[in-house]
Amino acid sequence: MSRIKKTEFERRRKRLMDHMEPDSIAIVPSAKEVIRNRDVEYPFRQDSDFYYLTGFDEPNAVLVLLPGRDHGEYVLFCRERDTTMELWNGYRAGPEGACQQYSADDAFPISDIDEILPGLIEGRERVYYAMGRHSEFDGKVMAWINTIRNKVRAGAHPPGEFVDLDHILHDMRLIKSAAEQRVMREAAAISARAHCRAMQACRPGLMEYQLEAEYLHEFIRAGARQPAYCAIVGSGINGCILHYTENASVMRSGDLVLIDAGCELEYYAADITRTFPVNGRFNRQQKALYELVLKAQLAAIGQIRPGNHWNQPHDATVRIITSGLVELGLLKGKVDTLIKKEAYKMFYMHRTGHWLGMDVHDVGDYKVGDEWRLFEPGMALTIEPGIYVAHDNKKVDKKWRGIGIRIEDDVIVTKTGNEVITADVPKSVDEIERLMAS
Ligand code: GLY
Ligand code: MN
Ligand code: MN
């Protein structure tokens, strides 16, 4: 039973069509199956835009929306049913199932699309399509248009305009409905449990991938069959490699381990990072830098409320981290000057967060024109400041080198402020040490 109801998918299609200009058509292709090696495929993952509008999770399908069409506005092209293929590879809805189970008004075999789709486009003035995102499909769209252009002398009317579909659709996806927020809370809760499990399982001598296994175990047993992205389990100096995914080193007493891992549940991502000591106790330098990152993270979360803009959390982290690094002696100079010169980037080189949703780095504009976007209820984002002191950074005292720390939580903007949906994983030094000792 899907957590997002059919009526919600229907509302989304209706809203999109309400935003489209008259006499237009929208075309959205599904994702394709991808070969991993020889005849082995990666697990199929539907394209987020396509799934958002259909709830249909098969490859080789095309969604067409035709506002105002007498014979139905919602058309799906999909694979036909096939007893042999279904025996080997599993159930297919087929055009009949597309109508009955997925509420399409009209559905056709994908093998007939070249014959049928030009006829649906013909006479429509505008085509809403994400040009440039699916290169192979771009060629097909142009071929269908050219089929119509080739018939102008017979009176055919090709469309005159292409409109970027992403703009409207991604603005819709940016604001999460109540049902979407419920799924995101569940994905967050599963991922939070996995982080707690890893903290309790951690000990010197384990391999990084053995901690990764604790996450995958917790995700899959909860029905979240895939992680939202490849887990980062970086101990010691590996914690300073921002996208470290080898996860193949032995974890040593005295080092920290930075873990960035979250599950995907029914197409919604969680994205959590915690950093904790392999042996369960922070040393003095680790604790000092950790508490600085935490202070920055809490201040950033405090900036999330309707009316504040996207960059306010980031600005807060930059100020706190810069002044903290000055106090600890890792940076020297006046805080304002160091901020202006971006001196903090030697230790804090990424942004404070990103939109979160069906894609871990979710869609949605960060600026409107030249202005940072204002927070609105229903937006979801991460807050993830960090400090990474390269192991060969000769500008700082040896005792700081090789420490990498990030703390990341997932936050939903509410009417009055925000809700941290990943708050179930401890993040103060005391809480972490207590959980690891238990
Ligand atoms: N896990 C990817 C990120 O934190 O942005
Ligand atoms: Mn992350
Ligand atoms: Mn993130």
Image: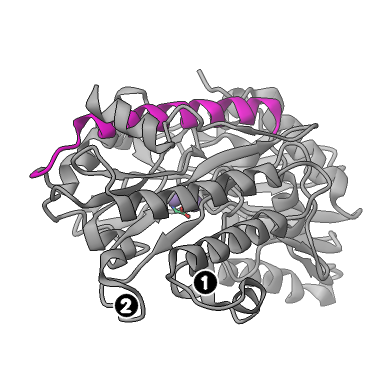
- Tag 1 and tag 2, C-beta contact below 8 Å: no
Q: Is residue 135 left or right of residue 200?
A: right
Neighbour class for label 1 at 10 Å: few (<14), some, many (≥20)?
many
Measuring from the top left, give residue 431's x and y in whole percent: 38, 29
Instruction: Please give the range of residues in magenta.
Output: 177-205
Q: How is the image coloured?
A: one colour
Q: Secondary structure at mark 2?
A: loop
Residue lying furthest left in this view? 205
State the quadrant of the C terminus.
top left
- CA separation, marks 1 and 2? 14 Å
Residue lying furthest right in this view? 22
Q: Is residue 64 left or right of residue 407?
A: right
Question: Which amino acid, mark 2?
Answer: Asn
Q: Is residue 398 above or below residue 432?
A: below
Measuring from the top left, give residue 60's x and y in whole percent: 47, 49
Q: Is residue 220 visible?
A: no
Q: Is residue 110 above or below residue 333?
A: above
Q: For residue 344, which numbered disc appears in the image?
A: 1
Question: Which amino acid, mark 1?
Answer: Tyr
Magenta segment, prevailing SS (helix, strand or loop): helix
Q: For residue 393, which numbered disc appears in the image?
A: 2
Q: Is residue 182 visible?
A: yes
